Image (cartoon, helix red, strand yellow):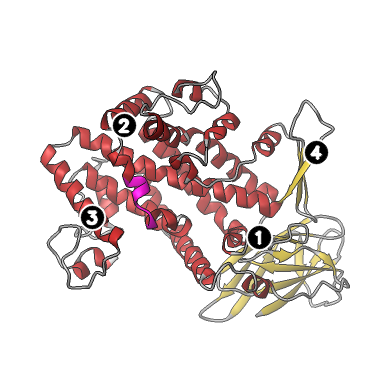
Amino acid sequence: MVYNCFIKCQVCEKITRVRLQVGWLPEHPIVVTCGECKTSLLGKVKIGQEIPGLTFSFENAEEVNDENADYMVECSGEFPVMKQRAAEDPLATPITPFMRAMNRMDSDDSYEEFGKSVGSLINTIGDRSQYKRVFDLSKDLNNEYLVKEIRKIFDESLMPCKNELEILRAVHMIEIHGFIEPLRKDVLNNLGISEGILKLDRTQTKELIDYLDRNSGYSLSELQRLSYKVMDEFLTVFPSLIPAFSMQYLKNETVDFELEGSTTSNFDSVKQFYLDVYEALGNLLIIPVALNNIKYRNDYDNLNPLDSRNTTLSDFIGLTKANRYKYCLDSEMYSDKLNIIVNSKLRNAIGHNDVEYDTASQRITYIPNPKDRTKIEEEYLLQFENEALRLFQGLLIVTEYLYRLRELQIIRRMDVNDAMEYMNRISRMSGILSTEKKLYPNDPCPCGSGKKYKKCCGKK
């Protein structure tokens, strides 16, 4: 369904036709610019789902009944749209964003998977305050209030929380359901990647954990809190990033960035999140780099010899973020699985304020090298947002690695029998999942609780 809304700029009084593709989101931002005076006409639309109806609100513009528009802009909360153009432009009434997206979906299941992921993340946004309380309290896994908050999310039969390992697992399940499942389901489909950390040389993993704890800002708990901070920030910005997120479900190179853009965001609304996730992941990268060191060089402190001047993790910590990202190698497993896109030149240009953004074309121009200001590079808003998303998705993989290291850290100080009971139960669960054995409601639950599957883990 397409709905036309006409708004008049309060500065120049020119009229813009907002051609809204009505979707299934209950609401989403509208970020457009007056084609005449370039004033930002920021707004929001609420879309009634159970009771049909649309409610618009705009800054610097008002709805009018005059349909003699000067400019036209496509609007969608879910997909890339054609950029703003003059109302008389013959391309001003193309097929809808939805139809264009359907013609470019990567597979028959892509649209359904996209909808499931977005719906799941919207639910996470709705549960944000509850999740944030758990994340904040998880600094101390023995905190009685943490267990009470977990009980509000998971039934006690599902998450007994009898010891630190089980409490840690409960907190991690929030990461999985709230973030990893909708954004990096490939991790759940290949549990061997993260579980392999438990099988690495125990002496080396112990020394790695001890090393991180000795370095301020890099202990497992500090890195975990850093990741939670970015997760919370992501929930604020995600509604603006949904059209960019949809590109991950389209066939490669089918979006024309010169002609297509977004009407849910602009450069300024995404820039701070991009900077924060870039910086946070730059610190978190020490985890996959160190795990690669153990796996490929049998020494957590032995860096890949990219540069003879940098051979240890201490050298790695001393590098700039841009140089740390050079160690995110696709030839080594734990960094390859991050699957990120990094434009360190653009990030540095933002830091030096060597960036300009054109709202009409949604083009970002920047100076990649401050020592040579004659050279200018560019990319478009959708590309920039896709990079931010991919960085965040890579960060989620590191949180999975962090979880495994924290498991090992707790096991070292636990009663042997409790630790073995926990590991055996998780091993049984993982074994059934990895072999994709069919579970029936009345089967014994693989977690080892002794209950039927439908009464235990099958509840979720």
Which residue: 64% across, 66% down?
79
Name the mark on residue 264: 1
Residue sitting nearer the eye, 48 or 397: 397
Q: Considering the numbered disc 4 on the image, is that residue within a helix, a strand or a loop? A: loop
Foreground tag (1 vs 4): 4
322 or 67: nearer the viewer: 322
Residue identified by numbered label 2: 205
At 47% across and 60% down in the image, what residue appears? 121
Asked which secondary structure carries label 3, the reply is loop
What residue did someone put label 4 on? 376
Residue 159, numbered label: 3
In 3D space, how far apart are the residues under numbered discs 1 and 2 (Cα atoms)? 44 Å
Give the x, y percent position of residue 168. Answer: 28, 45
Mark in the foreground, 3 or 2: 2
Image label count: 4
Range drawn in magenta: 189-195
The amino acid type of the residue labelled 3 equals Met
Q: Looking at the image, do the residues carrying marks 3 and 1 touch, with CB atoms under 8 Å apart?
A: no
Q: Marks 3 and 4, how far apart in space?
A: 54 Å
Relative vertical location of residue 368 with respect to residue 396 in this rendering, above or below: above
The answer to whether residue 369 is visible is yes
Q: Are marks 1 and 2 in contact (CB under 8 Å)?
A: no
Q: Secondary structure at mark 2?
A: helix
Q: Amino acid at mark 4?
A: Ile
Q: Earlier in the sequence, mark 3 or mark 1?
A: 3
CA neighbours of label 2 inside 10 A, class few (<14), some (14 to 19), many (20+): many
How would you rate the neighbour count of disc 1 (Cα within 10 Å): few for under 14, some for 14-19, many for 20 or more? Answer: many
Q: As shown in the figure, which amino acid type bears the numbered disc 1?
A: Thr
Viewer-side label of 1, 2: 2
